[in-house]
Image (tube, rainbow, N blue to C red):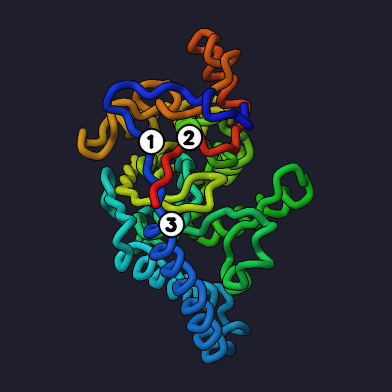
Amino acid sequence: VGGMSDTQFHPLRPGDQAPLRSLPATIVVGFLLMAQYLVSLVVMIIVGLLTCCQLFSNRRAWYRRLEYVFRVLVVIFCVKCNPFWAVTRYGRDKPLPRGCVVMVNHRSNADPWLLTAALWPDIVLTTFKSQLKPFIPHLWFMEEVPLAAGDKEQVAKAMDHCKRLLAAGDRVLVFPEGTRTTTGLLGDFRDGFFRLAEEVGAPIFPCVMVGSEAAWAPGSVLLGSADCHLCVGEALPAVGGAGAIKRQVREAMVSLAQSLPEAAISNDDPLLTEDPFPWYAMTPEIAALPKAERNAELRKARPRHTGGLQVCC
Protein backbone atom coordinates (compact mmCIF):
# COMPACT_ATOMS: atom_id res chain seq x y z
CA VAL A 1 0.00 0.00 0.00
CA GLY A 2 3.08 2.27 -0.01
CA GLY A 3 4.91 4.25 -2.64
CA MET A 4 1.94 6.12 -4.13
CA SER A 5 2.20 8.98 -6.60
CA ASP A 6 0.31 12.22 -5.92
CA THR A 7 -2.35 11.20 -8.45
CA GLN A 8 -3.24 8.19 -6.32
CA PHE A 9 -4.13 10.15 -3.19
CA HIS A 10 -7.65 9.59 -1.96
CA PRO A 11 -9.65 12.62 -3.19
CA LEU A 12 -10.64 15.14 -0.55
CA ARG A 13 -14.31 15.74 0.06
CA PRO A 14 -15.57 19.38 0.21
CA GLY A 15 -14.26 21.03 3.36
CA ASP A 16 -11.69 18.31 4.09
CA GLN A 17 -8.09 19.27 4.71
CA ALA A 18 -5.02 17.22 5.38
CA PRO A 19 -3.01 18.21 8.49
CA LEU A 20 -0.63 21.05 7.78
CA ARG A 21 3.12 20.67 8.29
CA SER A 22 5.27 23.78 8.27
CA LEU A 23 8.87 24.91 8.41
CA PRO A 24 8.25 27.31 11.35
CA ALA A 25 6.68 24.51 13.41
CA THR A 26 9.56 22.20 12.52
CA ILE A 27 12.16 24.77 13.61
CA VAL A 28 10.47 25.74 16.87
CA VAL A 29 9.37 22.27 17.96
CA GLY A 30 12.64 20.74 16.81
CA PHE A 31 14.55 23.25 18.94
CA LEU A 32 12.37 22.48 21.97
CA LEU A 33 12.78 18.73 21.52
CA MET A 34 16.55 19.10 21.24
CA ALA A 35 16.62 21.40 24.28
CA GLN A 36 14.64 18.86 26.27
CA TYR A 37 16.98 16.10 25.09
CA LEU A 38 20.12 17.96 26.20
CA VAL A 39 18.83 19.56 29.40
CA SER A 40 17.23 16.36 30.66
CA LEU A 41 20.40 14.38 29.93
CA VAL A 42 22.56 16.83 31.90
CA VAL A 43 20.13 17.05 34.81
CA MET A 44 19.68 13.27 34.94
CA ILE A 45 23.46 12.72 35.01
CA ILE A 46 23.86 15.25 37.85
CA VAL A 47 20.97 13.84 39.89
CA GLY A 48 22.12 10.29 39.18
CA LEU A 49 25.64 11.00 40.41
CA LEU A 50 24.44 12.85 43.52
CA THR A 51 22.21 9.92 44.48
CA CYS A 52 24.36 7.04 43.15
CA CYS A 53 24.64 5.49 46.65
CA GLN A 54 20.95 4.65 46.34
CA LEU A 55 21.81 2.25 43.53
CA PHE A 56 23.00 -0.20 46.18
CA SER A 57 20.20 0.33 48.69
CA ASN A 58 17.09 1.06 46.57
CA ARG A 59 17.78 0.78 42.84
CA ARG A 60 14.09 1.09 41.91
CA ALA A 61 13.74 4.43 43.74
CA TRP A 62 16.87 5.70 41.95
CA TYR A 63 15.38 4.87 38.57
CA ARG A 64 12.02 6.45 39.45
CA ARG A 65 13.65 9.69 40.57
CA LEU A 66 15.42 10.03 37.22
CA GLU A 67 12.25 9.10 35.33
CA TYR A 68 10.43 11.81 37.26
CA VAL A 69 13.07 14.38 36.24
CA PHE A 70 12.86 13.30 32.60
CA ARG A 71 9.06 13.53 32.50
CA VAL A 72 8.91 16.92 34.21
CA LEU A 73 11.20 18.31 31.50
CA VAL A 74 9.16 16.64 28.75
CA VAL A 75 6.01 18.36 30.04
CA ILE A 76 7.75 21.75 30.30
CA PHE A 77 9.65 21.79 27.00
CA CYS A 78 7.42 19.74 24.72
CA VAL A 79 3.98 20.97 25.73
CA LYS A 80 3.93 23.87 28.22
CA CYS A 81 6.48 25.94 26.28
CA ASN A 82 5.43 24.64 22.88
CA PRO A 83 3.16 27.02 20.93
CA PHE A 84 2.43 24.36 18.30
CA TRP A 85 1.44 21.33 20.39
CA ALA A 86 -1.38 21.12 22.91
CA VAL A 87 -2.92 18.11 24.63
CA THR A 88 -6.15 17.81 26.61
CA ARG A 89 -7.21 14.86 28.74
CA TYR A 90 -10.76 13.52 29.05
CA GLY A 91 -12.41 10.57 30.76
CA ARG A 92 -10.95 9.14 33.95
CA ASP A 93 -9.30 11.94 35.91
CA LYS A 94 -8.21 9.91 38.94
CA PRO A 95 -4.63 8.63 39.21
CA LEU A 96 -4.05 5.34 37.46
CA PRO A 97 -3.59 2.47 39.94
CA ARG A 98 -0.23 0.82 40.29
CA GLY A 99 0.46 -2.40 38.45
CA CYS A 100 -1.74 -1.65 35.43
CA VAL A 101 -1.27 -1.79 31.66
CA VAL A 102 -2.25 1.30 29.65
CA MET A 103 -3.11 0.64 26.00
CA VAL A 104 -3.45 3.43 23.43
CA ASN A 105 -3.63 3.77 19.65
CA HIS A 106 -0.53 5.00 17.83
CA ARG A 107 -0.74 7.63 15.06
CA SER A 108 2.34 9.78 15.44
CA ASN A 109 6.06 9.97 16.14
CA ALA A 110 5.09 12.57 18.76
CA ASP A 111 2.88 10.21 20.78
CA PRO A 112 5.50 9.42 23.49
CA TRP A 113 5.93 13.11 24.36
CA LEU A 114 2.23 13.93 24.14
CA LEU A 115 1.19 10.90 26.20
CA THR A 116 3.79 11.69 28.86
CA ALA A 117 2.25 15.15 29.23
CA ALA A 118 -1.35 13.96 29.09
CA LEU A 119 -0.86 11.23 31.71
CA TRP A 120 1.22 13.42 34.04
CA PRO A 121 1.65 13.28 37.05
CA ASP A 122 1.30 9.51 36.69
CA ILE A 123 4.62 7.95 35.70
CA VAL A 124 3.87 5.31 33.09
CA LEU A 125 6.81 3.32 31.71
CA THR A 126 6.68 2.92 27.96
CA THR A 127 7.79 0.42 25.36
CA PHE A 128 10.23 1.60 22.71
CA LYS A 129 12.22 0.23 19.76
CA SER A 130 15.41 -1.29 21.12
CA GLN A 131 17.31 0.11 18.11
CA LEU A 132 16.83 3.61 19.56
CA LYS A 133 18.70 2.96 22.80
CA PRO A 134 22.20 3.84 21.48
CA PHE A 135 20.86 7.22 20.30
CA ILE A 136 18.91 8.09 23.47
CA PRO A 137 21.32 7.76 26.42
CA HIS A 138 18.53 8.79 28.81
CA LEU A 139 17.16 5.26 28.45
CA TRP A 140 20.17 3.87 30.31
CA PHE A 141 18.91 5.76 33.38
CA MET A 142 15.32 4.52 33.12
CA GLU A 143 13.48 1.22 33.16
CA GLU A 144 11.51 1.67 29.94
CA VAL A 145 10.81 -1.52 27.99
CA PRO A 146 12.90 -2.17 24.82
CA LEU A 147 11.26 -4.20 22.06
CA ALA A 148 12.68 -5.59 18.83
CA ALA A 149 9.99 -6.82 16.46
CA GLY A 150 10.77 -10.28 15.10
CA ASP A 151 13.46 -11.05 17.69
CA LYS A 152 11.78 -13.75 19.80
CA GLU A 153 14.55 -13.87 22.38
CA GLN A 154 14.50 -10.11 22.90
CA VAL A 155 10.69 -10.03 23.02
CA ALA A 156 10.75 -12.75 25.71
CA LYS A 157 13.20 -10.65 27.73
CA ALA A 158 10.95 -7.61 27.34
CA MET A 159 7.93 -9.58 28.58
CA ASP A 160 9.87 -10.80 31.61
CA HIS A 161 10.94 -7.21 32.27
CA CYS A 162 7.28 -6.09 32.11
CA LYS A 163 6.27 -8.83 34.52
CA ARG A 164 8.83 -7.57 37.05
CA LEU A 165 7.69 -3.97 36.60
CA LEU A 166 4.01 -4.83 37.03
CA ALA A 167 4.74 -7.04 40.04
CA ALA A 168 6.61 -4.11 41.62
CA GLY A 169 3.58 -1.86 41.10
CA ASP A 170 4.72 0.09 38.06
CA ARG A 171 2.42 1.17 35.25
CA VAL A 172 3.33 0.12 31.70
CA LEU A 173 2.11 1.80 28.51
CA VAL A 174 1.97 -0.16 25.27
CA PHE A 175 0.77 0.39 21.72
CA PRO A 176 -1.17 -2.82 20.97
CA GLU A 177 -1.01 -2.20 17.21
CA GLY A 178 2.77 -2.58 17.42
CA THR A 179 3.49 0.35 15.08
CA ARG A 180 2.22 3.73 13.97
CA THR A 181 -0.68 3.94 11.54
CA THR A 182 -1.01 6.39 8.66
CA THR A 183 -4.59 5.40 7.90
CA GLY A 184 -6.03 6.41 11.27
CA LEU A 185 -7.72 3.03 11.50
CA LEU A 186 -7.00 0.84 14.51
CA GLY A 187 -4.51 -1.73 13.28
CA ASP A 188 -4.58 -5.40 14.15
CA PHE A 189 -3.66 -5.88 17.81
CA ARG A 190 -0.80 -8.19 18.68
CA ASP A 191 -1.36 -10.84 21.33
CA GLY A 192 1.75 -10.47 23.51
CA PHE A 193 0.74 -7.84 26.04
CA PHE A 194 -2.82 -9.15 26.26
CA ARG A 195 -1.51 -12.57 27.27
CA LEU A 196 0.92 -10.91 29.66
CA ALA A 197 -1.82 -8.85 31.35
CA GLU A 198 -3.94 -11.96 31.83
CA GLU A 199 -0.99 -13.95 33.15
CA VAL A 200 -0.07 -11.41 35.83
CA GLY A 201 -3.65 -10.31 36.53
CA ALA A 202 -3.00 -6.67 35.60
CA PRO A 203 -6.02 -4.48 34.72
CA ILE A 204 -5.97 -2.83 31.31
CA PHE A 205 -6.85 0.84 30.89
CA PRO A 206 -7.85 1.51 27.25
CA CYS A 207 -7.11 5.02 25.96
CA VAL A 208 -7.54 6.78 22.64
CA MET A 209 -5.50 9.68 21.26
CA VAL A 210 -6.73 11.82 18.37
CA GLY A 211 -5.07 14.77 16.66
CA SER A 212 -1.46 13.66 17.15
CA GLU A 213 -1.17 12.68 13.47
CA ALA A 214 -0.84 16.41 12.74
CA ALA A 215 2.09 16.85 15.16
CA TRP A 216 4.62 14.55 13.50
CA ALA A 217 3.44 12.09 10.89
CA PRO A 218 5.22 8.76 10.38
CA GLY A 219 7.88 9.05 7.71
CA SER A 220 7.88 12.85 7.78
CA VAL A 221 10.79 15.17 8.53
CA LEU A 222 8.55 18.23 8.91
CA LEU A 223 6.42 18.78 12.02
CA GLY A 224 3.08 20.51 12.36
CA SER A 225 0.66 22.23 14.69
CA ALA A 226 -1.57 19.83 16.64
CA ASP A 227 -4.40 20.09 19.14
CA CYS A 228 -4.43 16.60 20.63
CA HIS A 229 -6.98 14.91 22.83
CA LEU A 230 -6.54 11.84 25.04
CA CYS A 231 -9.51 10.00 26.49
CA VAL A 232 -8.72 7.58 29.34
CA GLY A 233 -11.15 4.75 29.97
CA GLU A 234 -11.91 2.67 33.02
CA ALA A 235 -10.18 -0.58 33.87
CA LEU A 236 -10.95 -3.76 31.97
CA PRO A 237 -10.18 -7.12 33.60
CA ALA A 238 -7.70 -9.18 31.58
CA VAL A 239 -9.62 -12.46 31.55
CA GLY A 240 -11.01 -14.80 28.90
CA GLY A 241 -8.01 -15.20 26.63
CA ALA A 242 -6.11 -12.82 24.36
CA GLY A 243 -8.77 -12.84 21.61
CA ALA A 244 -11.60 -11.84 23.94
CA ILE A 245 -9.50 -9.20 25.70
CA LYS A 246 -8.45 -7.69 22.36
CA ARG A 247 -12.09 -7.37 21.30
CA GLN A 248 -12.99 -5.65 24.59
CA VAL A 249 -10.10 -3.18 24.31
CA ARG A 250 -10.87 -2.38 20.66
CA GLU A 251 -14.55 -1.80 21.44
CA ALA A 252 -13.60 0.35 24.43
CA MET A 253 -11.27 2.52 22.30
CA VAL A 254 -14.00 3.12 19.72
CA SER A 255 -16.47 3.95 22.50
CA LEU A 256 -14.01 6.41 24.04
CA ALA A 257 -13.57 8.14 20.67
CA GLN A 258 -17.33 8.40 20.33
CA SER A 259 -17.56 9.95 23.81
CA LEU A 260 -15.21 12.83 22.95
CA PRO A 261 -16.88 16.25 22.53
CA GLU A 262 -17.46 17.42 18.96
CA ALA A 263 -14.76 20.06 19.29
CA ALA A 264 -12.16 17.38 20.13
CA ILE A 265 -12.63 14.98 17.22
CA SER A 266 -13.44 15.47 13.56
CA ASN A 267 -16.66 13.88 12.35
CA ASP A 268 -14.66 12.07 9.64
CA ASP A 269 -12.09 10.61 12.03
CA PRO A 270 -11.43 6.95 11.18
CA LEU A 271 -12.33 5.90 14.72
CA LEU A 272 -15.87 7.18 14.05
CA THR A 273 -16.34 6.34 10.38
CA GLU A 274 -14.22 3.18 10.01
CA ASP A 275 -12.82 4.79 6.86
CA PRO A 276 -9.18 5.87 6.45
CA PHE A 277 -8.30 9.55 6.70
CA PRO A 278 -9.87 11.31 3.69
CA TRP A 279 -6.39 12.37 2.52
CA TYR A 280 -4.95 8.86 2.84
CA ALA A 281 -3.46 7.40 -0.35
CA MET A 282 -4.91 4.09 -1.52
CA THR A 283 -4.14 2.08 -4.62
CA PRO A 284 -7.10 1.62 -6.98
CA GLU A 285 -7.07 -2.10 -6.13
CA ILE A 286 -7.49 -1.41 -2.41
CA ALA A 287 -10.02 1.39 -2.91
CA ALA A 288 -12.20 -0.89 -5.08
CA LEU A 289 -12.60 -3.53 -2.37
CA PRO A 290 -15.75 -3.71 -0.21
CA LYS A 291 -15.32 -1.66 2.96
CA ALA A 292 -14.79 -4.61 5.32
CA GLU A 293 -12.19 -6.25 3.04
CA ARG A 294 -10.47 -2.93 2.34
CA ASN A 295 -10.10 -2.11 6.03
CA ALA A 296 -8.89 -5.60 6.81
CA GLU A 297 -6.15 -5.18 4.19
CA LEU A 298 -5.21 -1.73 5.48
CA ARG A 299 -4.97 -3.00 9.04
CA LYS A 300 -2.68 -5.84 7.96
CA ALA A 301 -0.55 -3.81 5.57
CA ARG A 302 0.95 -1.50 8.23
CA PRO A 303 1.67 1.21 5.62
CA ARG A 304 4.58 3.56 6.29
CA HIS A 305 4.05 6.48 3.88
CA THR A 306 2.60 9.82 5.01
CA GLY A 307 -0.59 9.78 3.02
CA GLY A 308 -0.56 13.20 1.40
CA LEU A 309 -0.10 15.63 4.29
CA GLN A 310 0.08 19.23 3.14
CA VAL A 311 3.31 21.17 3.48
CA CYS A 312 3.46 24.91 4.13
CA CYS A 313 6.61 27.02 4.33
Tag count in the figure?
3
Badge 1 amino acid: Ala
**C-alpha span from label 3 to label 2:** 41 Å
In the picture, residue 137 is in which quadrant?
bottom right
Q: Residues within 10 Å of mark 3 (few under 14, many from 20)?
A: some
Contact flag, marks 1 and 2 (Cβ < 8 Å): yes
Q: Position of residue 4 (x, y in %)?
A: 59, 29
Question: Which residue position is annotated with label 3?
Answer: 98
Q: Residue at x 34, y 49 (%)?
A: 226
Please name the residue that numbered disc 1 is placed on. 18
Q: Tell me what residue is drawn at x 52 percent, y 88 percent.
A: 46
**Residue depicted at x 58% and y 65%:** 143
| Residue 212, above or below 73 | above
Identified by mark 2, the residue type is Gly
Look at the numbered disc 3 and give the secondary structure of its residue. Answer: loop
Q: Depth-wise, is mark 3 or mark 2 nearer the camera?
A: 2
Q: Quadrant of residue 176?
A: top right
User: The N terminus lies in which quarter of the figure?
Assistant: top right
First in sequence, mark 3 or 1: give its number: 1
| Residue under numbered circle 2 | 308
First reached walking from the N terminus: tag 3 or tag 2: 3
Determine whether 150 is above or below 34 in the image: above
